[in-house]
Amino acid sequence: MLVEYLNDTVRYIKLTGCHTLTPNAILSIIGANASSLKMLDIAGCWQTTDAVVQFTSQICGDNLIALDLSYCTKISDISLLALASLCPNLRVLRLMAQTKTTSLGIGRLADTMTKLEELTFRAISGVTDGICIEIIESNSKLKSLDLSYMPLTNEVLVSIARNIMNTIIWIKLEGTQVTREGVEDFFNIAQRAYKASHKPLALEMLYLTDCDAISRDYLLQVARRYKECMPLLDVG
């Protein structure tokens, strides 16, 4: 367990990979530090339940700005609805490998989250093009976006280019339905953003691994064509 303090109060708790922690143990750790807790990482705490997330949402509320629930596979829409209702100031949210979520919970998050700077929705249930586009359009400060291994299309990649090209740094759309046509549209829009701002874009990562018909060699060729507007870009 890692605990970070500021002025003798706990701001950050990291319990990553604590597989044996029971829900009651997690609740006890969170409850003892609730008044000052801003960042919570319980990724890989497999026994995390909806009750844990509900409790965290209730006692941390507006104070919570970062939450990692990756591989907390027991949680469902109940958790997402609690976060959407009670934690409007989240800047970092990571969900990975959740199979009990649906478009109801994911959609509610999309309706309420407007301050995100980093979002991971990776291999989770209930995510659609429309929900991702709503999130992209509502969060103009997004710097890191991982929407991998879900049935998403070119529309999401194009939405990124149209809405957050001047802020985004990392993009992962691995294992999606993005095609070369979407990639070409993305780079064309990015180039227009570069010409409008008169300064290079900050994008450092575009990963499209496991997308059919998109190889790394192809991405490297495209990236070289647009190196002037994205000099830091790495592709994969």
Image (cartoon, helix red, strand yellow):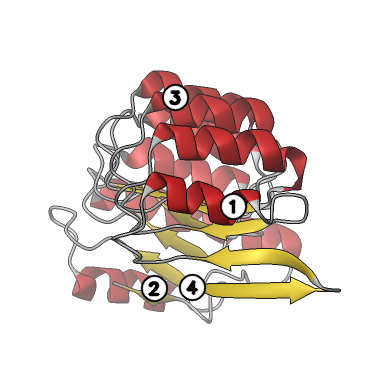
The percent coordinates of residue 195 (x first, y second) are: 67, 62
Q: Tag 3 or tag 2, which sits nearer the N-term?
A: 3
Asked if residue 104 can be seen in this view, the reply is: yes
Q: Tag 4 or tag 3, which sits nearer the N-term?
A: 4
- The answer to whether 107 is drawn above or below residue 225 in the figure is above
The percent coordinates of residue 54 (x first, y second) are: 54, 32
The percent coordinates of residue 126 (x first, y second) are: 32, 28
Residue occupying image coordinates x 29% and y 38%? 74
Furthest-top residue in this view: 104
The percent coordinates of residue 22 (x first, y second) are: 36, 51
Distance (Cα) linking label 2 and label 1: 45 Å
Residue occupying image coordinates x 49% and y 33%? 133
In the picture of the structure, the residue carrying the numbered disc 4 is 1
The crowd level at tag 3 (other Cα within 10 Å; few <14, some 14-19, many 20+) is some
SS of the residue at dot 2? helix
Name the residue type under label 2. Ala
Residue occupying image coordinates x 53% and y 81%? 231
Q: Quadrant of residue 111?
A: top right
Q: In this orientation, which residue lies closer to the viewer: 125 or 8? A: 8
- The answer to whether 66 is drawn above or below residue 55 in the figure is below
SS of the residue at dot 1? helix
SS of the residue at dot 3? helix
Q: Tag 1 or tag 3, which sits nearer the N-term?
A: 1
Residue occupying image coordinates x 67% and y 30%? 86
Mark seen at residue 78: 3
Name the residue type under label 4. Met
